[in-house]
Image (cartoon, rainbow, N blue to C red):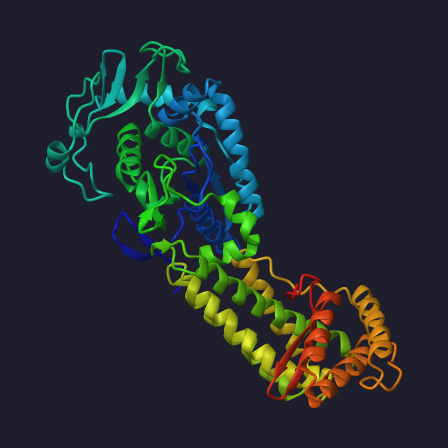
Amino acid sequence: MGLRLHNTLSKRVEEFVPREAGKVSMYVCGPTVYDSSHLGHMRAAVVFDVLRRYLEAGGYRVTHVQNVTDVEDKIIARAQAEGVPAEQITSQYGEEYHRAALALNILPWHVEPRATQHIPEMIEMIRGLMERGFAYYAEGDVYFDVTKLPEYGKLSGRVLEELKVGARVEPGEFKRHPADFALWKRAKPGEPSWGSPWGKGRPGWHIECSAMSLKYLGMGFDIHGGGDDLIFPHHENEIAQSEAYAGRGPFARYWIHNAMFQLSGEKMSKSQRHYVGAAEALRHYPAEIIRYVLISVHYRKPMEYDSERFEEARRAVDRIRAALASAATVRSRATGGGAGGAPSAALRAAARDGLGAFGVAMDDDLNTSGALAAIFDLVTAVNRETDPALKGTAPADALQPGLDEAVDALSRMLGILGLSITASRDDAGVRDRVWALAVALRQEAAHLFPVEPGPSLDELMVFILEGRQQARRLKDFTTADRIRARLSEAGVLVEDLPTGPRWRVVGTDGRAS
């Protein structure tokens, strides 16, 4: 059936059909750069990065726009509190956001407009809204009149009468209706301001995204995304002012919202100082572990920060790495002369099934948890079929070309999820370290290693593992454990299975790489 996405506007999952065949236009609300970015911001960025990757893998040409809000009340308040220009605040925290995004393997956006660079477009929109009777001037401010748009509330389900009861007018505001929102704010001492037909001032928050998205994507673009905390009032107001300005709809065809990343049951919030910073998380966990956590739960379900969740992700990533390392080891032993046997056929079938299950999950409203399950089914198949070859009880050639197909399938699926998990082999360096270890072991424990080792990595590992098994048979488990630890330091991971030890080339940090 193809990709289906939950549209907040229709409140249901719909088949995705872009306005122009083969092309997708997507606007995502980016950060307001007044403080450090947290894992909630990164979740939103990763969700829409995965969506973009999946669309591009399906052959679409995607234009991905994500803005930076660099003029807003919180930015001004932070700058005034620190006694520095607003530009210094936005530069500092904007760069921090970019560093975190780069570390988490988020693709660069095709366009990253900054609000302060689009003031003329915002002024033009406000002028048009006033000419059409949807906006009014009040003591230096300009407001959008929500009562003039009968469909106001269609995204969030809010009703004007309910809003009137629950809203309040702040001191200094001259609204006609409590739900009216500012399009232009008159200048206050010490705040950044620009000239306009209504005097010096600055734009309201909502008009910024409307002006920038319309400039780069045009009316009726395909996907508007962001966190579900933006549904009201931000996205509701974007729809209202954009469709009133254009005199038609829709402003955007599909509204996609991710749920919050929570801390102690509440959404992470910079303004409340209640968050786990992205930079802090990156100091504690590798980037691929954090990214795995962010996609391990369906994007529309809230996530709770939990250290055990990160440890589970570490184990999961290591499983994938280990399978890829096993595959790399077996492929290095194959001569490439055979057409493969039954294990190869089994792996080819597993690769096809894995890709099929992955596509079904992703088509089902970007079900990344289901997509990860498909990856692990293939990981299990790779481990099952490579195990005999790793132990030397089956020829490596019997696994080709199925093993090649399985590795390619894993790489494709991981790439769509943006997970940079590979089995990087440095056989020359590993072989040299293992050779030095073998020489040392023979000198230290000749009773365990009575013969000379062969020169290849495979022969060296047979030599060392046989000596280690002999230590275990003699119940010298201290020596056996020390040998295993020294192999890990040399770049080889040994797993003790009921059927015997299995080894693979790994990174020198002791984890498959």
As drawn, is 175 to the left or to the right of 243? left
As drawn, is 506 to the left or to the right of 249? right
| Number of residue marks | 0
Give residue 297's position: percent from left, percent from top. Answer: 40, 60
Place residue 142 in its image quadrant.
top left
10 versus 456 height, above or below: above
Viewer-nearest residue: 405 or 447: 447
Quadrant that contains the N terminus:
bottom left
Q: Is residue 467 visible?
A: yes
Place residue 362 in its image quadrant.
bottom left
Residue at image point 57% right, 70% down: 319
Quadrant that contains the C terminus:
bottom right
Residue at image point 85% right, 83% down: 446
Give residue 53's position: percent from left, percent from top. Answer: 51, 53
Q: Is residue 355 visible?
A: no
Residue at image point 30% right, 40% down: 250
Give residue 60's position: percent from left, percent from top. Answer: 50, 52
Viewer-nearest residue: 261 or 30: 261
Give residue 392's position: percent from left, percent from top. Answer: 73, 86
508 versus 109 height, above or below: below
303 versus 397 height, above or below: above
Residue at image point 72% right, 65% down: 489
Viewer-nearest residue: 362 or 133: 362
Viewer-nearest residue: 295 or 135: 295
